[in-house]
Amino acid sequence: MRILITAGPTREHLDPVRFISNRSTGKMGFALAERAAARGHAVTLVAGPVTCETPAGVRRIDVVSACEMLDAVRRELGDAQALIMCAAVADWRPKRLSPVKLKKRDMEPILELEPNPDILLTLQPDKGGRLFVGFAAETGDPLAEAQRKLIAKGLDLLAANDVSQPDAGFAVDTNRVTLLAPGCDPEHLPLLTKHAVADRILDRLERLNL
Ligand code: PMT
């Protein structure tokens, strides 16, 4: 299969040295890319700013902001049979971007934001026969919100992780996810390495592609 994967955070700059972002390190998305390539899939990885090494055999495209990630995914989607959106895309960006470092005295104490495009929703009309896989990073009641995202974003598969737990979600080598698919019972996975979680997601994706 030709699989397009996104990983890492996006950064939304307000000037050349300041930005808003999140705690994603790219570990989960890079584990997916590594395992998918090892299984013989052709993998393109669109990565936000991370320090992970590019896995062997993976074609990597680096981006910074959500808008750049949307452009890259839109460009690469035509050739892909599946899209796995593992990136933690920032939902908001500063309304104004200064080309020079803002002086403290020129800054307002209130940062004005505007919404970023939702990549999965924006590309929904171009989905065609492709498989779309999402992640949901939740705190609180992960399953209810993840079920809502599965339907709202028109996904074939969604991995819900409870990011309030110290051994799952952001920045750690392990994850505990529940896999949701339309019309299927939730599949609760135990605590696994991110590479093992990647394998379980790819098992489901390969079955959906039959
Ligand atoms: O990178 P790590 O440190 O290993 O951490 C892994 C992870 C916690 C980032 C990963 O497992 C994860 O949960 N990624 C998705 C995080 C997220 O943005 O979840 P969300 O519930 O906000 O978004 C739901 C889905 O919509 C995701 O597939 C997301 O990629 C996508 N999305 C979100 C916002 C946006 N503007 N466009 C999108 O397409």
Image: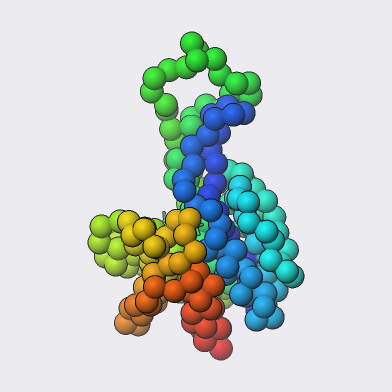
Could you say which is closer to the camera, residue 170 or residue 89? 170
Q: How many marks?
A: 0
Which residue is pictured at 69% across the width and 66% down the height? Answer: 55
Could you say which is closer to the camera, residue 91 or residue 165? 165
Q: Can residue 154 be seen in this view?
A: no
Counting from the top left corner in percent of width and height, residue 163 is at 36, 58
Which residue is pictured at 52% across the width and 86% down the height? Answer: 207
Could you say which is closer to the camera, residue 9 or residue 209? 9
Counting from the top left corner in percent of width and height, residue 59 is at 73, 63
Which residue is pictured at 43% across the width and 17% down the height? Answer: 108
Left or right relative to 68: residue 191: left
The N terminus lies in quadrant: bottom right
- The vertical placement of 103 against 75, above or below, is above
Figure quadrant of residue 56? bottom right
Q: Is residue 114 visible?
A: yes
Which residue is pictured at 64% across the width and 70% down the height? Answer: 34
Could you say which is closer to the camera, residue 154 or residue 30? 30
Counting from the top left corner in percent of width and height, residue 51 is at 63, 51
Left or right relative to 99: residue 152: left
Counting from the top left corner in percent of width and height, residue 179 is at 39, 75
The C terminus lies in quadrant: bottom right
- The vertical placement of 156 against 78, above or below, is below
